[in-house]
Amino acid sequence: MPKQTYQELIEHNIRDDAVLQSIGDGLIVIVDVNKGGKIVYVNKVFEDMTGWKLDEVRNKPVIDVLPREDKNGKTVPFKERIVTKVLSGKKVVTDLTEPFYYIRKDKSKFPVASVITPIILNKKIVGAVETFRDISKENQVDKAKTEFASLVSHQLRTPFSTINWYVELLLSKDVGKLNEKQTQYLEEAYRASKRMVNLINVLLSVSRIEMGTTIIEKKPTDVVKLALTILEDNQPEIKRKGLKVRKIYDKNIPKIQIDPKQLSMVFQNLFSNATKYTHRGDKITLKIKKQKGRLLIVVADTGMGIPKAAQPNIFDRFFRADNAKAQEPEGIGLGLYILKAIADQMNSKIWFESEENKGTTFYVSIPRKEVAE
């Protein structure tokens, strides 16, 4: 190789290394992703964050150098790690609402957000590049905001309960007759107050979920009876919109061991959304079916549906599709987020099928632990 060309190659490598070392996030380059992942390069930020030096980790499996845990402290096997998803050829960005943890050389751990991009050579994936950052500060700020929302919600709950009680007393006419205008004004105030109470309850649910303070009390629960009770609670709105409700459930569905409060919230969110986004005079269908070891809950509507572009984000906190915003401007985009969080707590699976202007079907598959009558 000519001397000048060799010198240029050295200078080129030095420039490349300087660029990689100056990146503000931890950087790791992995090859043989489909065989477990072998480290070929890390930058200085990686060394500072993990305690490992490049010479110590080069050619070692990434799972040995950088074990990963989920938010519950469970070790994530390599086949389930995000880096394996790049085998499909797509860049993967982690979800900040579901952080994971990397384990340092000294066995301490830190929460991480990362971006993983495949390395493609001659149309083949030969490796992956991951950049990641420590999100401990973001988590602390998020926790402080959640605690503040919880505190404010608790403080607001009592006065609104008092307001509702007195308005109900006035509307019952136990303390005197009201004229038509007075009744109209009080009913408006009562509806507004009830909306605020519902919002406060939603915020409290979110704060409990995110702080991990939800108390789960499992007991034998009749799922069909519970579903029909929640459906009855939604009857005023169902009747107002002239909706038809079809109920289909298997015979002899046993009681299952589950927290009825959590399951009530699942049904409430499913029925509320179906009622809210279904056009006047259309149809809602409830199905409860037994499956092998599981119970499948299906709530379908013939409403506006979810646009395809919005579907990947539908369970995100505060996210709302544009057509939902147009129909219900007062929504805050927490119902489906809570629904997904509760399903996760119940070790249940939740998914949906939807087509814009043709309706949406939500599915919740619950582990079935039969309880004797």
Image (cartoon, rainbow, N blue to C red):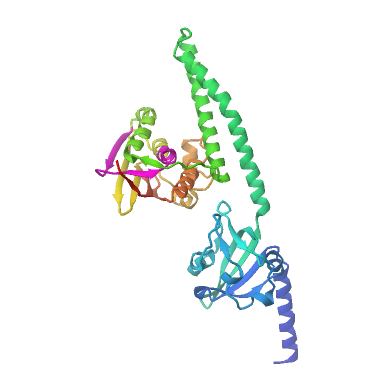
Viewer-nearest residue: 239 or 145: 145
Residue 73 against residue 166 in the figure, above or below:
below
Q: What is the quadrant of residue 223 in the picture? A: top left
**How many dots with numbers?**
0
Q: Is residue 95 left or right of residue 295?
A: right
Instruction: Residue 138 in the image: state x and y as whole percent.
Output: 66, 51
Determine if residue 303 is in view.
no
Q: Which residues are magenta?
A: 243-269
Left or right: where does residue 184 sit relative to residue 60?
A: left
Q: Is residue 258 magenta?
A: yes
Q: Is residue 116 magenta?
A: no
Would you place residue 370 above or below residue 197 in this image?
below
| Residue occupying the point 48% across, 38% down | 326
Q: In this rendered view, identify the residue nearer to me: 305 or 74.
A: 74
* Residue farthest front in this picture: 372
Give the percent coordinates (x, y) of residue 288.
31, 44
**Residue 57 or residue 338, whichever sits in front:** 57
Nearer to us in this view, 25 or 74: 74
Residue 306, x across and y down, in percent: 43, 46
Q: Quadrant of residue 230?
A: top left
Say if 366 sits above or below 39 in the image.
above
